[in-house]
């Protein structure tokens, strides 16, 4: 029993360590910056701006796997861990897509000329930031990289600022994305220094 617990704990530690390279933080950061810039300067595509980062998820995952294998080797996790990861990743993607679509719909509904000024209208400038913060929390829970809560907190703070000051909903996404991208870049540089590419 003790050996089983030790193996599970070791697998959990190894699994979480594979998210210490900073690439996910960079991807999140660039995605937030792109969505924020689109909302501020490209209003014609603001509603579908989140689609573009989603398109690059699969290529990013494939690149990241090759990048990690070249530096830390290949790790095959147990079937239970793989099922847990696939199930939670699918649920998170579905929930994220639903939340984002709902948030955009509510925002445009509230901002339409026919809508009245209610509490939801007050919150609408920060709505996208709040939804993306919830998605970042989900990623943190899936990967065990709880440092991402810092980015979620920046998003929430920016969302509150946007709601209070009635700013463009894309504004709070840019600083949060910059923080995430800078944090991830620092981690990636350190990771590459600590794990040089294995010679062929």
Image: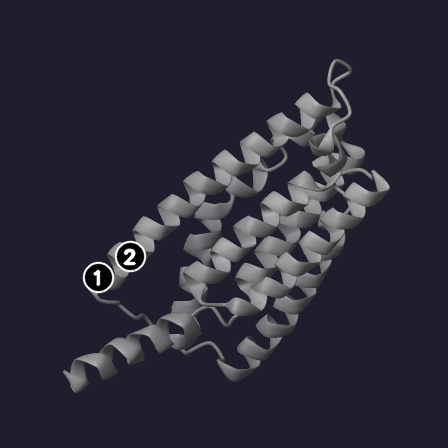
Where in the figure is residue 104, as x and y percent of width and height? 62, 30
Looking at the picture, tell me which residue is in the foreground, 43 or 68: 43
Q: Can you give x and y, in whole percent of width and height, for residue 1 in the image?
A: 14, 82
Q: Which residue is mark 2?
A: 84
Instruction: Tell me if residue 121 comes above or below residue 161 in the rendering.
Output: above
User: Looking at the picture, does residue 113 appear above or below residue 83?
Assistant: above
Question: CB of mark 1 within 8 Å of CB of mark 2?
Answer: yes
Number of numbered markers: 2
| Residue at x 76%, y 55% (from the top left corner) | 175
Quadrant of the rendered image containing residue 76: bottom left
Q: What is the quadrant of the C terminus in the image?
A: bottom left
Decide which of 7, 166 is in the foreground and name it.
166
Direction from residue 123 to residue 83 in the image, left or right: left
Gap in angstroms between the C-alphas marked 1 and 2 = 6 Å
Would residue 200 be visible to someone looking at this image? no
Q: Residues within 10 Å of mark 2 (few under 14, many from 20)?
A: few
For disc 1, the marked residue is 80
* Residue at the outermost bottom position: 2
Is 35 situated left or right of 42 in this image?
left
């Amino acid at each position: 029993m003790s050996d089983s617990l030790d193996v599970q704990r070791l697998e959990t530690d190894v699994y979480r360590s594979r998210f210490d390279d900073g690439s996910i933080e960079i991807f999140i950061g660039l995605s937030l910056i792109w969505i924020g810039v689109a909302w501020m300067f490209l209003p014609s595509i603001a509603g579908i701006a989140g689609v573009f980062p989603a398109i690059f998820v699969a290529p990013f995952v494939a690149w990241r796997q090759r990048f990690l294998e070249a530096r830390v080797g290949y790790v095959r996790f147990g079937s239970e861990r793989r099922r847990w990861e696939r199930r939670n990743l699918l649920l998170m993607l579905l929930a994220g897509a639903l939340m984002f679509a709902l948030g955009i719909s509510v925002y445009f509904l509230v901002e339409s000329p026919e809508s009245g000024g209610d509490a939801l209208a007050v919150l609408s400038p920060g709505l996208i930031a709040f939804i993306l913060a919830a998605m970042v929390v989900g990623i943190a829970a899936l990967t065990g990289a709880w440092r991402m809560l810092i980015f979620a907190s920046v998003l929430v703070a920016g969302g509150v600022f946007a709601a209070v000051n009635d700013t463009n909903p894309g504004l709070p996404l840019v600083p949060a994305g910059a923080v995430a991208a800078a944090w991830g870049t620092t981690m990636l540089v350190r990771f590459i220094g600590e794990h040089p590419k294995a010679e062929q």
